[in-house]
Amino acid sequence: MKISFNWLQEFVDIDVEPEKLAELLTLRGLEVGDLYPIGKGLNQIIAGKVINIKKHANSKHLYVCDVDTGKQIIPVVCGAPNLKEGMIVPTALPETELPDGSIIKQAKIRGEISKGVLLAEDELGLTEDHSGIMELPSNSIPGTPINTILPLEDWILDIELTPNRGDCASVLGIAREVSAITGNVLRIPDIFYKETQIEANKLTSIEIEEPDKCRRYAAGIIQDIVIKPSPFWMRYRLHMAGIRAINNIVDITNYVMLEMGQPLHAFDLNRLRGPSIRVRSAKEGERFTTLDGETHELKNDILLICDAERPVALAGIMGGLNSEIFEGTTNVLLEAAFFDPITIRRGSKLLGISTEASYRFERGVDIEGVTKALKRAIKFMVELADGKAARGIIDNYPKPYKTIPILIHIDKANRFLGTKIEKSQIKSYLKALYMQIKDIDENCLEVIPPSFRTDINREVDLFEEIARLNGYERIPVTLPYIRPSEYKESKELKIEENIKNIMVGMGFSEIITYSFISPEYVTKIGIPGDFIQLMNPLTIDQSVMRTSLVPGILETIKNNINYGEYNLKLFELGKIFIKDKNNKETQITEKLLLVAGISGLYNQKSWFSSERKADFFDIKGAAETLLKSLSSKEFSVKKIKDMPSWYDKSEYAAIYSNSHILGHIGKIAHKVLSQIDIEEDVYIMELDIEKLLYYFIEPKKFKPFSKYPAVYRDISILVRKEVESKKIEEIIKKTGGNIVESVYLFDIFEGGKINPSEKALGFRIWFRSMKGTLEKKEVDNIYDKIIKEIMKETGGKLREA
């Protein structure tokens, strides 16, 4: 929020420079994000008096003016429509630099010499007005720099308000803070004005149908107004705050909103149908056209301001086109209200409309300040629009504000803050913030916060106010007291940490993707499509909760490939979200999964190794390494028919433990990759962490090493191609029992003299006993049994040398 330093000084004396004030406010909890000067560099622009005007001989739209600059009279060619003799205007002489950096030069315009330029407000960088030449006060002396005539030089403090400090969304609000910090007296704006004998309550009435959504609605009537431009000082301040000037009536409502923090709205009284104002909720599907010309379909969550027949404004958000102020307006109904912050926030988001008014209503305005702001605006309309204010105002206040006392304990405050602040000092801080204080005992105070501090509801809120005014920088630095946890670290967290460490150790990089995905993945990949739909998605590509981690990792691989990174090893630990019809409370089940992916080269070419592309066995090896590192339990890898649709049938397997599927590994099918524009082969591993914990993980136990020597035997078996090496390995271990220490597949051979339907598998079997040295005969007997069992179960045979 942008605040003018000069404007602030009208409310409170400021004895420090703008830079120091910005520092003080920031240290007291109101962060000044930016501080910058405005109105600088205008000392070369002088006041010039137009003493004569004549038509340009060679143009229908230009004039030649004689301008008194204080030292000489110069000719200036100008085409402004508001030129008149005797007016004092900003004048730039040759070689003057304007705020936009351009340099004024003497020129001949259609045959007439022009020795300067008469300037409009926008050319001076003061407002957006380019309707004519800016007019200076009539008592200005020609030749005087304009920055000494008008208070143009100022500083803007751009304050970054937190959502709980709606009371500071105004000049008055910041001035209160400055007053509390410096101890200087706060000056309240004047709200006195003359009234006519016509009573306002005889011209209109107010009915509130939703007192919970509109706790107060006040209105005043101003008649016989004259619509015209606002004075320069008002337009200049609006421009500094980023608000466009429109006309005196609309500008007054915006000015008072910036000044006092209370949004206002002016209705053309003659365009209202019927004498009354009603505040009600919208009907489902009701349509309304706002001031910006947009027509909106409404829901019953939205609050409306209506006349006797129709809506005329979206309460707290924007007025309607059907009752706006225009050049012919003569009578005004001026509104000031307190609307429920949640109602305005919900309506603003539903409609996608955010305004200066909704910004303040959403944060909470001062319910006791509604009529003060209303009267301040009426005063301006009487003075600046020649209006006649009806006697009194209408104030419908069904649920008056009630103060809620809060007890604050001095010792507790000091313990909480780590300070030693005296009770008298705490009282002075709270009084400076306009709180009512009552002594209960030596250690306790009863505090009543002012109505504009809607954020103070608890004792701890008062602690924060004490800390702010005492100065955060004065709170001593202490190390936090840390109690040892009474609970052990959960098994799930330990496993997640172990998984991450193991994956990183294998060269994988962790990624984190969005939990929201596009429903198109049902057709693109074939993932389960019973999605949980988001009510207010940011985009269609993030409109449903994911039911698989595969889309996220494939999109990440695709994005990396698009940037030229082909050789990837990525993993993600994340949750998926599945509809659960058995769970009536949430109807959603969350499952923690692991997904890992490999693409591109697994080995890059070097002096000691050749280039090799990633394949199925690389992702299988990663799965085996992870599972072996996590547990001593046995697992197996098998092909199954009922496989996820995104895998290639020829390169896929399921991971089992105790007949339970823990996950899947395989190559992503080419038809799936083509759907998402990936041309590289991608290999994926998926693991269900919950099943892993339940069926697989068990504490590792130390197993003593055998002190006796090992014996190995090699075996080469001819089997059908469809026989998996894992099956033969299982037969060897089962037949050999405890004596078989390990089995290692060292060779696979196909072709040559071998039948095309067969393959030769070479295994090395290590035998070792924990009880003693194995005899050759004992090993040979077990070896023979192993061969017979393999031949029996697989139909294989020994390969001849």
Image (cartoon, grey):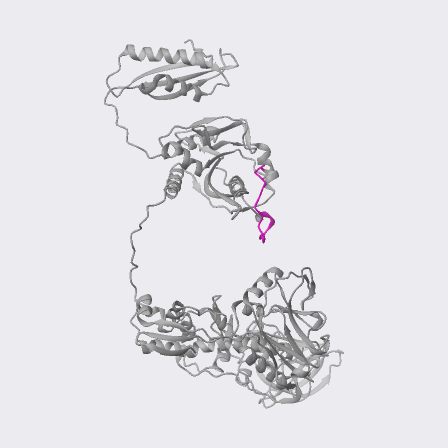
Q: Quadrant of residue 150?
A: bottom right
Q: Nearer the viewer, residue 376 or 507?
A: 376
Where is 152 relative to 683, above or below? below
Percent position of residue 4, x then y: 51, 76
Q: In the image as oriented, which residue stretches furthest toward the top? A: 800
Q: Residue 76 placed where, x, y %?
A: 66, 82
* Of the pair 96 and 208, the residue shown nearer to us: 208
Left or right for 410, reference 213: left
Relative horizontal placement of residue 769, taking residue 801 as reference (left or right) = left
Task: Determine which quarter of the picture holds residue 744.
Answer: top left
Between residue 606 and residue 182, name the one nearer to us.
182
* Number of marks in picture: 0
Q: Report whether 682 appears left or right of 301.
A: left
Q: Is 539 contained in the magenta span?
A: yes
Q: Which residues are magenta?
A: 525-541
User: In the drawing, does residue 197 fall left or right of residue 19?
Assistant: right
Task: Return the x and y of residue 626 as percentages of the image width and height.
Answer: 40, 34
